[in-house]
Amino acid sequence: MLRNGQILFLCALALLTLGVLMVTSAGMQIEQASAEQPIQGDGGLSPIAILSGRIGIYAALAIGAMAVAAFAPASIVDRVIRPRPHRFYQILGIGALVLVGSLLLVYLPGIAREKNFSSRWIEVPAPVLGRVSIQPSEFVKWSLLGLFAWCAVSAGDRLRSFWLGLVPMLIVLGMVSAVIMKEDLGTAVLVGTTGIIILIAAGAKFWHIGALAPVGLGVVAAGLFTSEYRMKRVTSFVDPYADPAGDGFHIIQSMGAIANGEGVGRGLGHGLQKFGYLPEDTTDFIFAIISEELGLFGVALVLFLYCVLLTTGSDIAKREQRPVARLFILGVIATIGLQACINLLVVTKLAPTKGIALPLISSGGTGWILTSAALGLIIRFDRSQLLGVALPAEPADDAEAEADPPSEPVGALA
């Protein structure tokens, strides 16, 4: 019988495979034949061409990252996730500087790359691939989960104190989310939400967070109402046909692709909306192409794979005895689940248009690799459960223990 970690790997592999197929299909273009350059019979889309191309290389790197994380030495992983209460403020401060600094790289001349009037990427040279685009917010999104899981457990009883534990962590979360929000409101909301989920699960008092909720909601509202293009997305969501050739064009074309798929779909590679009609067809709106070409079967397959992945990850979290690992798994599952829900709601016109990817399917090398690495760590934790590895939460040496005696985390994961 398959273990949870093996099921998780198979789900991730299936989603990546579907992503490679659909991104390749959505990226097809019509070329005009000429006497000098006749169109070849295979169209350049042979399996070898796909696997050896940029998309195939990214998928291979993602699988490699998942394997490296899944087979990481247990001694190193256990040492990293061991709480150290006396270093709580130190690690939290250093982590905040690293995360904010990573986000500010998108404004650094020479490597910054602007796309669609948004600065979210940096470009760096890479072997074989040439210059590749990296999205620092993806790195921050996953790194924050590890930082918050470790700090929440290391804080111990201080997390239930408003000023000593909760406020410092909320300040870091607010700083990171605010920097992300300048360019990407959706990812900022996602990061903020998963951070709050980890804090509540670790034992933070719900009423403390509830008392500060209006501040967070006010910042999000300010980010929305002070941005003209974000407000246009809201108005086009209410009535896309008020400006069908402008602000409403995107969502109208997405709904058209879904409707054209009907029940059985047009067939893989035979969609029409990808030929210049549907913007961002390989990234944020890849689900519309899946619906058009694979029909209800493709829709059901995507939903099934996500449901199995999320329920399997949740089961691993329930069995995990180490608080830091359990919180990290919860954060990864919450991030993938919320991100998938937001994307599906946007594509099906149940939420305003927002540029957020469908995990492991939408084109994006950074997203594929980091998401796979996070899932690989969950598989590593599942393998540790099989081997019966459960190290104590205390620091490794007596000197550290005397500096600040550890306290057990309080709350749902205690």
Image: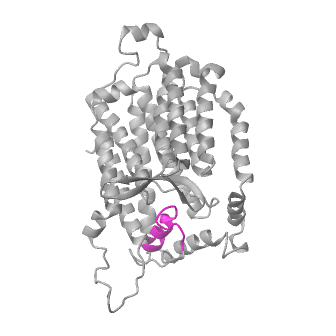
**Vertically, is 133 above or below 178?**
below
The relative height of residue 113 versus residue 286 in the rendered view (above or below) is: above
Residue 345: give x, y in percent of width and height: 58, 58
| Foreground residue among 316 and 64 | 64
Task: Find out whether residue 135 is within the magenta segment.
Answer: no
The residue closer to the viewer here, 383 or 412, is: 383
Q: Quadrant of residue 176?
A: top right
Residue at image point 60% right, 43% down: 179
Task: Determine the residue positioned at 32% across, 85% down.
Answer: 39
Does the image show residue 262? Answer: no
Tell me which residue sits at (53%, 50%) in the image: 109
Residue at the outermost bottom position: 35
Quarter of the figure with the N terminus = top left
Residue 147 position (above or below residue 286) = above
Q: Is residue 403 left or right of residue 187?
A: left
Give the colouring mode of the picture.
one colour
**Residue 260 % position (x, y):** 51, 77
Q: Name the one closer to the observer, 148 or 261.
A: 148
> How many labels were placed on the picture?
0
- Residue 287 falls inside the magenta stretch: yes
Foreground of the two, 224 or 253: 224
Report x, y in % for residue 93. 54, 27
Q: Which residues are magenta?
A: 278-295
Residue 221 picture location, percent across and down: 72, 47
Residue 302 seen anywhere in this rendered image of the structure: yes
Look at the picture and state if 331 lies above or below 304. above
